[in-house]
Image (spheres, rainbow, N blue to C red):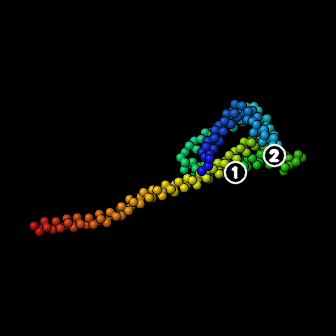
Amino acid sequence: MAIISGATIITSLSLFHITLAFFFLTNPNAIADQTLVFIIGEAMGLPNARSFETQSPPLAFLAAVLFVVGITDLVSISMPEEISQHHWGSQAPVRLILFFCITLYSYVFSSVSGLYTNSTYQPSSWGEGLKNRVLFTWAFVEMITWFWVFVTLREERRDMVLRIQQRRAAEEDMIKPARTFVFCITPTLVHSVRFFSTLLRTIKDVDVLF
């Protein structure tokens, strides 16, 4: 059994999304100035996007999306265990792959990547906004977290299957004595019914004679 359950990790991640939504809406510069963003950005050599320094309609839209995702994930994780396991068991690998692709694209196809030199790099017409330290840090943290969720859920699924098998075995053990009792008493009941049927016919025959 994992020390931290998958439900706890997903709940924490949902609250993290809601917190990000609040700061993107009210003070986006607080996110861009975070120590983790600075350390990872400097280590990878990614540029700092100045668009995160002030409030803007795109950041407000992003805040609304993150808030909705956080709330819906909180509702989903509160479902019964078997339903939640089935739902998040399919969600975790998909989100892991998506965030891995975003993280890979954000660095590998940026101007600081080893694939390019300063003279050969051409800015993308649509994906240049994805190549900054804020997005890379967010996608990297999401990728690591969803990998953790994926591994934890696989371990919990094995435990859940084992519990279901044990419960079914216990139910079978409870049903077997009842079946044995029914099988034992059925022949006796059949003989009793036959005896009383024969007795009733005999009584009727005697009444007819008299």
- The correct choice, above or below, for 67 with respect to 98 in the image is above
Give coordinates of residue 153: x percent, y percent: 61, 50
Residue 124 in view: no
Q: Which of 101 and 178 is in front in this view?
A: 178
Tag shown at residue 97: 1
Q: Quadrant of the C terminus?
A: bottom left
What secondary structure is found at the residue carrying circle 1?
helix
* Rendered residue at 48%/58% (across/down): 169
Q: Nearer the viewer, residue 14 or 51?
A: 14
Q: Nearer the viewer, residue 189 or 134?
A: 189
User: Which image quadrant is residue 132 in?
Assistant: top right
Residue type (three-letter) at the residue carrying disc 2: Ser
Tag shown at residue 57: none
Q: Is residue 159 left or right of residue 25?
A: left
Give coordinates of residue 119: x percent, y percent: 89, 46
User: Which image quadrant is residue 43 in?
Assistant: top right
Residue type (three-letter) at the residue carrying disc 1: Ile
* Rendered residue at 22%/64% (across/down): 196
Residue 172 in view: yes
* Rendered residue at 65%/37% (across/down): 18
Mark 2 neighbour class, 10 Å CA radius: few under 14, some 14 to 19, many 20 or more: many
Mark closer to the chain start, 2 or 1 = 1
Q: In this view, does 34 lie to the left or right of 186?
A: right
Residue indicated by mark 2: 110
Give coordinates of residue 42: x percent, y percent: 81, 41
User: Which image quadrant is residue 49 in?
Assistant: top right
What secondary structure is found at the residue carrying circle 2?
loop
Q: Nearer the viewer, residue 161 or 29?
A: 161
Q: Is residue 16 left or right of residue 191?
A: right
